[in-house]
Image (tube, helix red, strand yellow):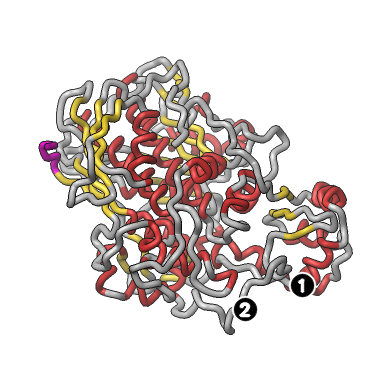
Amino acid sequence: MDVTTNMTRDVPRPLAGTIVRACGDSVALRVASARLRALGCVVEDGGAAPPDAPAGRLAAVRAPFPGALPECAIGWSGPVRVPMSGEHDVQAACGIMQVHGRATGGPRALPIDYASVCAGILAAQAFTAGALAALHGRTDVAATTSVAQAAALALTQYVAVATAEPGADRPARPARPARSGAARTPPFRSSDGVRFELETFDAERWLWFWSALGAARAPIVRGWPPFQQRFATATCELPPELGRAARGHAYRAVRDAAEAAGVSVLPIRDAAPPPPAPASPWRLRATAPAPAPPFRPPPDGPGPLAGVRVVESTNRVQGPLAGHLLGLLGAAVVRLEPPGGDPLRGVPPLSGDSSVRFLALNRGKAAVEADLKTAAGRDAALRLAATADVFLQNWPPGRAARFRLDAADCPSLVYAHAGGWADVLPEPQPMGTDYLVQAHSGVAALLGGPTLMTITDVLGAFIAAEGAVAGLLARARTGGGVRVETALIDAARLLRSAVHSPVDGAARAPVVSDLAAMAADPAYAALFETDGTAAYSRAPWTFDDAREFV
């Protein structure tokens, strides 16, 4: 695992002085160990994984602050009553194969240890949150998680839709087998053989782009709904005329048409090395030398972040899921939304008056509406942020400065930005979205072509929440504000650098082909909760009183 462990000079590593014993050798454990080293821990080899943590265990044996010592046990099945003993089993039994394979005809394994990498981030996050709780006198800092629980959380939006609309996760007609170079699903191919991804959230720009390439209006219009919805459905069957239009032009002409239309295009880089690692996986920087207000969690609050208040201004997947994770750890989360509320609230299917996709990422959060394009709205946002410990946003570059809601405007907080590219690409940057990041980073090539499952959005959210927790611990130990900068490209880098297990051969666990049936199966009851309309992933950890490490 290639993770740089040096923090930026102005923020001491928040877990410096902590010694951790790591037992086991799974990808999840290696990812978590590398993250803890980046936070300042010395990680010692503790031998084989114990029976109660078959994917590994991390336990602090010494810490620079008094109180309970945090730990995290990692399983494979966790609370699921289906035997699993590796990444392939988890992908099969928890629905990852089902979602990844939708676009190409049936369940298909991701050729990367995706669930394990997610579990490693969740384990490091739980350990760090436990250290913060221990610093404030709590004893419930012994976390337990599993690769299966990480997989369920990664699929929470898909499960919500499948359970609200049974059959929605299966194609309306028998899926056709994938064909080499098939044009019905992105990526596209130019006449000079360049495979590329494109992105826009604007129907008019979509129309301008394809019209410039000579496509007729009817297939352009037919193609917009599946293209727009591919983030939610993990499928994208486009009219073949669009693929033919792309193949009629060299990539330079495609790029020129995209630039004129305001559409982002990037080639799929077949042999790209991983982007260079930043000095810190979360780019922690000090923002204010003045002491922050003292943190006093209520003694009976649930979760290691009880007493923490988060204000978020986010949309789509990465930002809201990061805030949701902080809420699952016990923080009180307030969403800052535009007048009329987040547009995603009204996207079917609905549970009551809210979209189940929105609820999968935002249930339990309060909401305040403010128009940040006005002085009154910005003032309201600043007043709200002044009540918080964390301000989380996923705006594109430049918007925070225009709103006058940048880290310098919230100096005593943990100011967390969940972005797309960080400083990997120069300005003006393309849109920072999942499929473009997969294309540029080499993840798409690693997979044999991009997956329409939103793997970097979800993992990017996990990393953003991890960074916010690290920032909270740094703030608690130094008394100063902290800026946290994470990006989807960090998720791609981690997927590129993780050690991958072979996925050849059949999984020993059953392959899930129906997410609604999985969520209704009593064997999976510990993974999901329901509001009567849809099922959603539960918190991926439990926290108990610390026990002595042997």
Disc 1 residue type (three-letter): Pro
Tell me the quarter of the picture where residue 134 sits. top left
Q: Majority secondary structure of the magenta segment?
A: loop
Tell me the quarter of the picture where residue 465 sits. top left
Q: Nearer the viewer, mark 2 or mark 1?
A: 2
Asked whether residue 187 is in view, the answer is yes
Image vertical order of residue 208 relative to residue 403, above or below: below
Q: Which numbered dot is residue 240?
A: 1
Query: Pointer 2: what residue?
Result: 176
Was residue 427 drawn as part of the magenta stretch in this picture? no
- Can you give x and y, in whole percent of width and height, for residue 464 in the image? 45, 40
Give the mark nearest the N terminus, 2 or 1. Answer: 2
Q: Which numbered dot is residue 419?
A: none
Asked whether residue 133 is in view, the answer is no
What is the total number of numbered labels drawn onto the structure image?
Answer: 2
As helix, strand or loop, the secondary structure at mark 1 comes to helix
Q: Which residues are magenta?
A: 545-550
Disc 2 residue type (three-letter): Arg
- Between the residue at mark 2 and the residue at mark 1, the CA separation in whole angstroms equals 14 Å
- Can you give x and y, in whole percent of width and height, for residue 280 in the image? 47, 28
Q: Residue at x 52, y 70 (%)?
A: 348
Image vertical order of residue 198 relative to residue 488, above or below: below
- Can you give x and y, in whole percent of width and height, for residue 442 in the image? 61, 46
As helix, strand or loop, the secondary structure at mark 2 comes to loop
Q: Residue at x 30, y 75 (%)?
A: 521
Badge 1: residue crowd in 10 Å (few <14, some 14–19, many ≥20) = some
Badge 2: residue crowd in 10 Å (few <14, some 14–19, many ≥20) = few
Q: Nearer the viewer, residue 357 or 427?
A: 427
